[in-house]
Image (cartoon, rainbow, N blue to C red):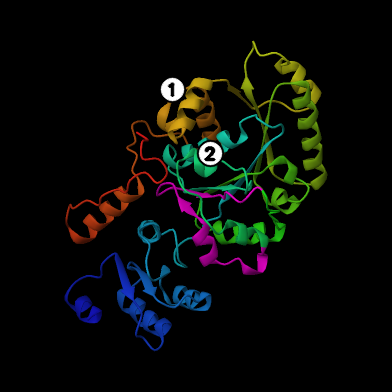
Amino acid sequence: MFAQMLEQSQAPKLVVVDTDGQDDPAAAMKRLAGMAGTECKIIAIGSANDIELYRKMLTAGAVDYLVKPLATETFGRSYSAALRGAIGGKGEAKEAKIVVMIGVRGGVGASTIAVNTGWLLAHELKFQCALLDLDLQYGTSALALDIEPGRGLRDVVSSPQRVDSLMVASSIVAASDQFAILGAEESVEDIVPIDSAAITALLKEMRGNFDFIIIDLPRHMLASQKRLLAAAHEIVLIAEMSLAGIRDTLRIKNALQSLGSAAHVTLMASRTNASQSGQVDRDAFEKGAQIKIDFIVPEDAKAVTEAANTGKTLGATAQESPVTKVLLAFASRLSGKTPTAGAQKKGLFDTIAAGIAKLTGKKEGISKPAASRSSEAP
């Protein structure tokens, strides 16, 4: 039937094919891809949950293989990525920039900075960005965006030999069509092992699909994640301007130097407030820590609290906040790109609806689902 359609008209931009009932699904996919040509993206679906079949289908020409029954969110994510050309084996390979963020002291707002930087890279600067929160028990990345964390990250980071595309895909939650979250809310009563080799394998699977991977790394994991620190392109130290902040910034900076990491190190001074007791001035901090401060993030408790309580980012709720402006400047420096004024923000389902309209010539929309975690959120 598909062959007859191609004889009568031009190949569509995207096709979804059910491979159930085929004796050799990979061979059938190869024939179909050959008929459709390189401009047509093919998403295959089937009942077999087999990683070897998944790899064969990608090799045969599919951009993705999804296992039935299909979840709306999973299909939407694959559909959107296929239209962007961000998945599958065709096209120019990406190499994500890995940015590791470390709070040198507790309570300096490292997680808030990580989430908001990722959001700004995705929505203001239009990059594909993922945030990996390695605090599997107390991490707040998913909570900050009012979404449910994925369920598979614990298995991914504990067993390097089990890491594959399907496992990684099941752990990722799409906050939007350009911003993805990998986080967890594991029991505080459990010991959660994190294998450095598993992190390396995870990043290998991810880096071809994103422009930036932001990693929120708890400072107590520094000793166990030397491979990650060595692989990072940028390491961001977030410190308070106090004597303890000076001490711990210096200790972590020296530890990074001993690793021989080629990553560029950025220092952010956070929670700065001239009236706050215990703070030292900039010159004293830089002299004691033996490193220059690159960005000073001012205190804006009202804007940060409002964003946290509504499950939104500062970029969405407080664009004029001084915190937002500093983080946007940092994101721009990371990417070498400045935001486009007045750019319209589109969500995942807007992108899917636009893609369907373009393919079918119709202007029918797709209803967006209700908020996942809060029925009262505006």
Nearest-to-viewer mark from 2 and 1: 2
Q: Nearer the viewer, residue 164 or 156?
A: 156
Q: Which residues are magenta?
A: 159-188
Q: Is residue 176 magenta?
A: yes
* Left or right placement of residue 130 versus residue 72 in this view: right
Q: Nearer the viewer, residue 323 or 335?
A: 323
Task: Indicate the amino acid at tag 2.
Answer: Val
Distance from the alpha carbon under mark 2 to that under mark 1? 17 Å
Image quarter (top left, top right, bottom left or bottom right) of the C terminus? top left
When asked about the image quadrant of residue 163, the answer is: bottom right
Secondary structure, mark 1, is loop
Q: Is residue 93 visible?
A: no
Q: State the SS at label 2.
A: helix
Give the label on residue 115, or none: 2
Furthest residue in direction bottom, as rendered:
23
**Residue at x-position 56% and y-position 34%:** 112
- Residue 194 vs 12, above or below: the answer is above
Q: Position of residue 324 (x, y in %)?
A: 49, 27
Which residue occupies 71% across, 17% down? 282
Please indicate whether residue 139 sits to the left or right of residue 24 in the image: right
Q: Position of residue 110 (x, y in %)?
A: 62, 34
The amino acid marked with disc number 1 is Glu
Please say if 101 is above or below 278.
Answer: below
Left of 325 or right of it: where is 356?
left
Q: Which residue is mark 1?
A: 320
Question: Mark 2 vs mark 1: which is more N-terminal?
Answer: 2
